[in-house]
Amino acid sequence: MTSTTVTSDVPALVFVDDLAEGFGAPARPFHGASPFHRADPASTPIDVLDLGITRGDGVFETAGVNHGHPQAIDAHLARMARSAALLDLPAPRIEVWRRAVQEAIEAWGSDGHGAAKLIYTRGIEGTGVPTGWVYVWAEEPEGPIERRDGITVVLLDRGYRSDVAKTSPWLLQGAKTLSYALNQATLREAQRRGADDAVYTSTDGFLLEGPHASLILRFGDEFITPGTDQGILKGTTQGDAFDWLEGQGYGVGARQVRVEEFAAADAAWLVSSVRCAVPITRVDDREMAIDRQVTDGLNAFLLERDC
Amino acid sequence: MTSTTVTSDVPALVFVDDLAEGFGAPARPFHGASPFHRADPASTPIDVLDLGITRGDGVFETAGVNHGHPQAIDAHLARMARSAALLDLPAPRIEVWRRAVQEAIEAWGSDGHGAAKLIYTRGIEGTGVPTGWVYVWAEEPEGPIERRDGITVVLLDRGYRSDVAKTSPWLLQGAKTLSYALNQATLREAQRRGADDAVYTSTDGFLLEGPHASLILRFGDEFITPGTDQGILKGTTQGDAFDWLEGQGYGVGARQVRVEEFAAADAAWLVSSVRCAVPITRVDDREMAIDRQVTDGLNAFLLERDC
């Protein structure tokens, strides 16, 4: 055990033993009948040889948690399975993961706002046995101030063409992997440029997504998100947002959006599981108005959805 | 502590406490006077919230170890510092890391062939305190068979232009990060295509590097490696190889190499710290002859260098 003085304050950690097709059964006798088990986060349990750390070789999901329920969990689990397939990881046992998330929420024991992270790695180098765990933490009940006041963004090149997922699938665009160093560096670059966040663009001139969020643009009564055939993630929150918008009578659609179209948008948001819908108030040097009515309505819905 | 039945067999693990400028001193009283401390790898010491695992947010180096000495350690430490700078990590304390590597080799206690991995992450989420460790493992004394018999490679698109490091530094090309999921996926794609390994190409038609190795090509009495201004790593083994080749009277140089030039090469190698110089016997569908004399001479030098 490390004697480092810094320790984790994750409130609830659950290891997923029977995590994937073909894996898990040998470990079960040690944990009784359950396909997962609670663990003590203070005992720092990740192996130094886990490929999740030595190679960023794994996938993850982050789901909002409200009133004891993970939000959009079906969509998160489906995306995790899709990411795992893109990485040639064994198919995750969806029902086991779903129950493990619920177990972690119960271990957390709060009825408030929080978030659950699901991590699924290729496991300890040389063993061929994948590793998985879920943890839950509390979020501010009021949510981030930016949900109300908005954020400024800069457009930053992702360096790839919009057809990269089709031409070069080994670049894993469209998979939510643990290899997020570039996403983190992109956020730092945005901050260096005086902005809060970034929107990636393709080398052939299309808007893509944020480093940690999906992009939604409003053009009149139409809401548009960049299509996922461009090597970007299928947004779980974006999906729920579009359901709500349709219910409000708006049109919704996914397509390629040229960079120049940002200037014609009436409003825009970065949406993600924990921050929900954050309005964009500036793109590079151009100011944008906050669409207060849609922002507030959408966030009220996203924060209270129980699905 | 996790009760998973799979455990690490890392023989020697050392945590680096005083790992970077501005960090480490508060932890020192717990470890006596030393700026690092040995740890038990079986106690699985990485925190679930370490950004190295949640975001692949860190850098690494792998150095060969021979007769109790890490090879090309100056070059590895210099590259780690360069990678850290690209990731805006605090400057690593090079002398502490150098001594930590030696400590891990002593803990390993063998005079044979091995390898040392240095990992330096952004640390546990929310603390702002980076994390670092070194571990050492044994390699086959005879080395991989491919060092003698060679490997087949396929050319695979990296998806970026060759000037990406200049235009878009936030994409971290040229940094050796923990976000290696793409490199691993590229190797799997190569194997799916019936090859052993891959050489990346840029979208504008230049040869770059392997997912885990540098490329060296022979044209007559000239040995050429793709220049590092194209967003690729400065090869530590390639550097030593060029020193040896120059000593043998050959010319060496780094420049842009067009994909078509592969066909004109007399021989080619992928070179890296642990595998050393591995001759390439096929590129896509084109067979290449092994340059036995240079391959054997170079590997004899690389395996016995004591620097």
Image: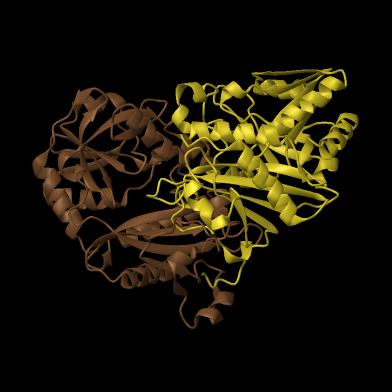
Chain colours: A yellow, B brown
Q: Is residue A224 left or right of residue B190?
A: right
Q: Is residue B275 left or right of residue A266?
A: left
Q: Position of residue A246 (x, y in %)?
A: 82, 20
Residue B160 shows up from this direction: no
Residue A194 higher or lower than B158, as above or below: below
Q: Is residue A48 left or right of residue A303?
A: left
Residue drawn at 55 percent across, 49 percent down = A17
The C terminus of chain A is located in which quarter? top right
Residue B187 shows up from this direction: yes
Q: Can you tell which quarter of the image residue A265 is in?
A: top right
Q: Please state which of residues A125 and A201 is positioned toward the viewer in this rendering.
A: A125
Q: Can you tell which quarter of the image residue A287 is in?
A: top right
In the image, farthest residue toward the left: B293
Q: Position of residue A182 (x, y in %)?
A: 55, 42
Residue drawn at 73 percent across, 27 percent down = A239
Q: Please state which of residues B86 and B144 is positioned toward the viewer in this rendering.
A: B144
